[in-house]
Image (tube, coloured by chain):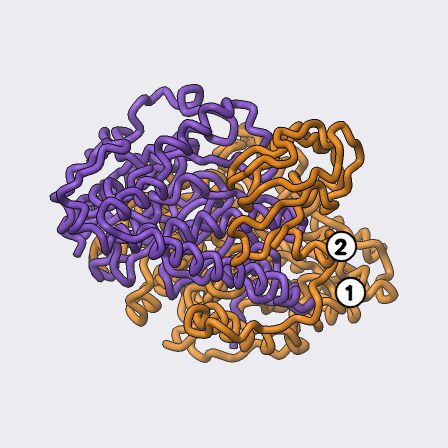
Chain colours: A purple, B orange
Amino acid sequence: MANGTESAVKRRGGNGTQAAPAAGHNQGILARAYREMLLIRRFEEKAGQLYGMGLIGGFCHLYIGQEAVVVGMQMTLQDGDQVITSYRDHGHMLATGMEARGVMAELTGRIGGYSKGKGGSMHMFSREKGFYGGHGIVGAQVSLGIGLAFANWYRENGQVSLAYFGEGASNQGQVYESFNLAALLKLPCVFVIENNRYGMGTSVERASASRNLSQNGAPWGIPGEQVDGMDVLAVKEAGERAVAHCREGKGPYLLEMLTYRYRGHSMSDPAKYRTRDEVQKMREQSDCIEQVRKLLLEGGRAEADLKAVDDEVKAIVADAAEFAQSSPEPDESELWTDILVETR
Amino acid sequence: MGATILMPALSPTMTEGKLSRWLKKEGDEVKSGDVLAEIETDKATMEVEAVDEGKITKLLVPEGTEGVQVNAAIAELDGGDGSAAPASGNAAPAAEQGSKPAAPQQPESNATQHGGATGQVAKGAEDHAQVAAKGAEEREGVSARPAAPAAEPEKDWGETKPTTVREALRDAMSIEMRADKDVFLMGEEVAQYQGAYKISQGMLDEFGPKRVLDMPITEHGFTGMAVGAALTGLKPIVEFMTFNFAMQAIDHIINSAAKTLYMSGGQLGCPIVFRGANGAAARVAAQHSQDYTSWYAHVPGLKVIAPWSSADAKGLMRAAIRDPNPIIFLENEILYGQTFDCPVAEDFILPIGKAKVERPGTDVTIVSYSIMVGLAMQAAAELEKAGISAEVINLRTIRPLDIDTVLDSVRKTNRLVTVEEGWAFANIGAEVAMQVIEEAFDYLDAPPARVAGLDVPMPYAANLEKLALPTVAQVVGAARKVTYK
């Protein structure tokens, strides 16, 4: 499955130019991608709405615009593989199969949340789904991520870890320490840079002297590719190459996903560092969901089928929002639990 | 079906704002992502995007209005296809900030869809019940107060043999690594070099390069890697050549290792030992001579151990490796070569969180840890000559602090002296003294006294370095002061 069965699809770097011959072959994949990306989109819109209503507090970083990256990458993984990311993490959780209810209830700080309301937007985990957070310190998840890969290497279990980080984090010192360690030990780790062009309000051009982040691992011999991160099939295809490389014991791999976030860095970001036109242009010309929708329709899928998916997704999100508001706040005794694992 | 658009909260602190400008007018069709209006928050002017689709039927708040409360209705929208998802307005009456939702109900539909999440929570609830009792107990008392029973006599482990602290540490790690394949040692120069301080001598030969791993000089990266591995259930022992270099990695120790269990609602523990030399060595100057005990002892989610003797080192290292929590194990370079009698019993282990009365006495309690216990013992011998009977307590574990053993002693001697190498400001002595004041103020016949390192970066010059560190004479002086003798 991880060996590039879809590699016939020549889509690298294509923004909007579709590989029609393969479209039929990909219908199943496209349908799955459509549903999963849409679920993330609608979930995030709802989260934004609940934030606006004061039901979600603190920091809340939405993933809207970047959905193709996690959905495409997740399709390349097997059970037991691990995923770790930063604080823009709701999309990753949903992609790994974590339940919308548990994620939304964590956002509202309720006992039904994945962390019993004690972690919030930035800190959720599911060992069962291989999701290891949810980390609030920029770049920290990269070192932790090679630790997940180290555990695979140590246990010789053939599993692969994905460490996601933004182009902002890509300048952190520990990222390069991690490149070195991963290359040195040949750890099965795919580094996925989600280059959405802005680290908070600073554009990648103003923050990074490197003009091609996919080559940032080159000094350590880490192969790297730039990928159209708005094109879920391109993501999946590149992801399969990367994951296969890792699974074969050849060491780490680096993917730079060229993507875009439509919303601000967090909910309180007025986003004055870019023009409205820039955002609008991305939405209209490169939207990952619209691309797939178009392919599905071209492939013969009926509007009504897609509408049914829309309705199903909306129902899941509405149910999650309802659960997130009706689940009680954690009991006061929760204040004192989970500080240490109890011994004896 | 219509929907009401509400004044959104656009920052964590916003309670009201100015509706500066409408970008849509009545009758306009809007779709998700369209900018509806500009709102001035307490921080900035922000654009508000539509979430639901439909036609604007009414603008309820004219532009230019100031002080519009969060969650006030600002416009009405004609349903569109928003029927499947409740529009923001539907929840409006109950949605005021801070208000709790009505009667919590566990939605019963979509059971297969959502079984996972509910299962998770149920699992968590078991632990929850178990630990809740302890939490309540802790809240009543002092913050870090252990629920341990009052001091029991130290168990007699039988036969002992003279052992250096260095050997004791190596023995402990080797025994535990033989017993558990998930335990491994990593750090700079731990393998081929045989350890910068020879703690891991011979371990590469016995366990091989996969379990005794040399690391490049990148503390930040390899500590993060070790923590990541521990989150999956492996049990790394991370050697810092000295704890001074752990400063490069302290983010992972605190933010990643100590806090993840809590942030994950109890799902992800971090069974890891961070160990290495702490405190002053000899003539290595300011950047290589610092006691970090109070830094780590400050943090909930960590256990902090500071052994003195070989028995401490061996018994507590074994306990640390077996403990499912992140442990800071603070060794001392000068102690590595010192020899103490150490139990030889195969099952010898010491409990974390238990202090030891190293020398019983009646007139003054001297509390110390790590290398300074030796100083306290010398001072006690001097004091004996002057007719003052000192009780010396070796804390062994700093967090959780065994304050009960200290309190029992102070209730007997009515006087307290603390001795440590670290700077006095906010040090362990300050914590011990405060807890004694809180719990046994009436027993004190004199203000507690602290002996500590001087409040200066460690100087290099031999004479100045000597002046910066605590001395036997200072401990004797402090004991005399509190006993008025």
Residue B339 appears in the picture as rendered:
no
Please, which chain is the residue tagged with disc 1 on?
Answer: B
Task: Pick the quarter of the image with the N terminus of chain A.
Answer: bottom left
x and y percent of residue B362 in the render? 75, 69
Q: Based on the displayed image, in which of its 4 quarters is residue B210 positioned?
A: bottom left
Residue at coordinates 28% horizontally, 67% vertically from top-left?
A: B181
Assess disc 1: are there few (<14), some (14-19) or many (≥20) residues with their C-alpha within 10 Å of its C-alpha. many
x and y percent of residue B350 in the render? 50, 71
In the picture as drawn, the residue positioned furthest to the front comes out as B27
x and y percent of residue A216 in the render? 29, 29
- Please tell me how many numbered marks the rendered image carries: 2
> Label 2 is placed on what type of residue?
Ala
Name the residue nearer the viewer: B116 or B479. B116
> Label 1 is placed on what type of residue?
Asp
Residue at coordinates 34% horizontally, 44% vertically from top-left?
A: A68
Above or below, A114 against B212 in this view is below
The residue labelled by disc 1 is B363
Mark with earlier residue (1, 2)? 1
The residue labelled by disc 2 is B479
